[in-house]
Image: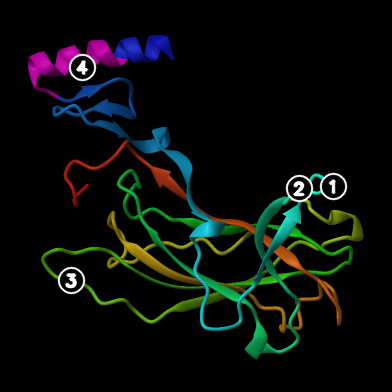
Amino acid sequence: MKKFLTLLLISGLWFNLMGQEVKLNTNLVVESDGTLRMDGNATAFTDLVVPVTAVRLGSGNSPQFVSMKNNGSGSRGVYTFTFENQSSSSNEQEVFFSIQLPHNWKEGTTIYPHVHWSPQTATTGVVVWGFEYSWVEYNASTPIAFPNTVLETVSSAAIGVGDVDKHFITPFSAITPTADQDKISGIIMCRFWRKSADAADTYGGGGTGNAALLSFDVHYEMDGIGSHTEYVK
């Protein structure tokens, strides 16, 4: 790391003197204004996290905010939203949130939404999660309307009796942005729910099968530390 920082410093002096773009190697570039840019295979993946406490509940069909774990001797413990097994689609529990594409996102690249969750009932089966969204970029000159939503459901891995409190990740399909979605500061309006009335959701069978939401996040590819200007990459 020290060698890397030294190299950046030397490079910084160079482009300040010469006013030219400097390539540290084939894919790592310091632009003439000092911006660090990652090209090709130099890009990296990171998380865009929606914390559990950042979600909002609707007018009904809300998951229960309950204690997930405690120390076993009277502590208050830690809490999260738990999605119950509902047999009717009209009762399926849901939360709502929004996501903003950050300034270090490599514009136009695919994003990868997924849910972190934990079984809370000692039973077997599969959980079906649902994700609904509408995504549009920010365009200062020609504002763009949000399109109709896209809905997707996905089944988890099979859960066993001994999997209570274990940490699982269930990925949704990768999303490749359209021409109206491929710029920084785009907003994704989201609904997330457990589609427990689906025949494929067998966790708990006809009885209790609770699933705790740990986090929802999106893996995305970044190609720098930010954008050149406030709204334009």
Task: Give the vertical position of 51 relative to 27 (above or below).
Answer: below
Q: Residue at the location (73% across, 65% down)? A: 211
Dot 2: element? loop
* Label 4 packing within 10 angstroms: few (<14), some (14-19), many (20+): many
Instruction: For the residues labelled 2 and 3, say whether their Cβ atoms are less than 8 Å apart.
Output: no
What is the C-alpha distance between the residues marked 4 and 2?
53 Å
- In the picture of the structure, the residue carrying the numbered disc 3 is 143
Residue matched to label 2: 75
Magenta stretch? 8-20
Q: Which residue is drawn at 19% across and 26% down?
A: 34
Q: Residues within 10 Å of mark 1 (few under 14, many from 20)?
A: few
Q: Which of 100 and 183 is in front in this view?
A: 100
Marks 2 and 1: CB-CB under 8 Å? yes
Label pair 3/4, CB-CB below 8 angstroms = no
Which amino acid type corresponds to the residue marked 4 in the rendered image? Gly
Viewer-closest of 70 and 124: 70
Distance from disc 1 to disc 4, alpha carbons, whole Å, reads 56 Å
Which quadrant of the structure image shows residue 169?
Answer: bottom right
Q: Say which element carries label 3.
A: loop
Which is more N-terminal, label 2 or label 4?
4
Q: What residue type is labelled 3?
A: Pro
- Tell me: 39 left or right of 172: left
Q: Few, some or many C-alpha atoms within 10 Å of disc 3 (few <14, some 14-19, many ≥20)?
A: few
Q: In this view, does 226 lie above or below 198?
A: above
Residue bearing mark 1? 72
Position of 110 relative to 97 (above/below): above
Q: Earlier in the sequence, mark 1 or mark 4?
A: 4
Q: Does residue 169 appear anywhere in the picture?
A: no
Where disc 1 sits, the SS reads loop
The image's colouring method is: rainbow
Which residue sits at x=27%, y=57%? 183
Of badges 3 and 1, nearer the viewer stands 1
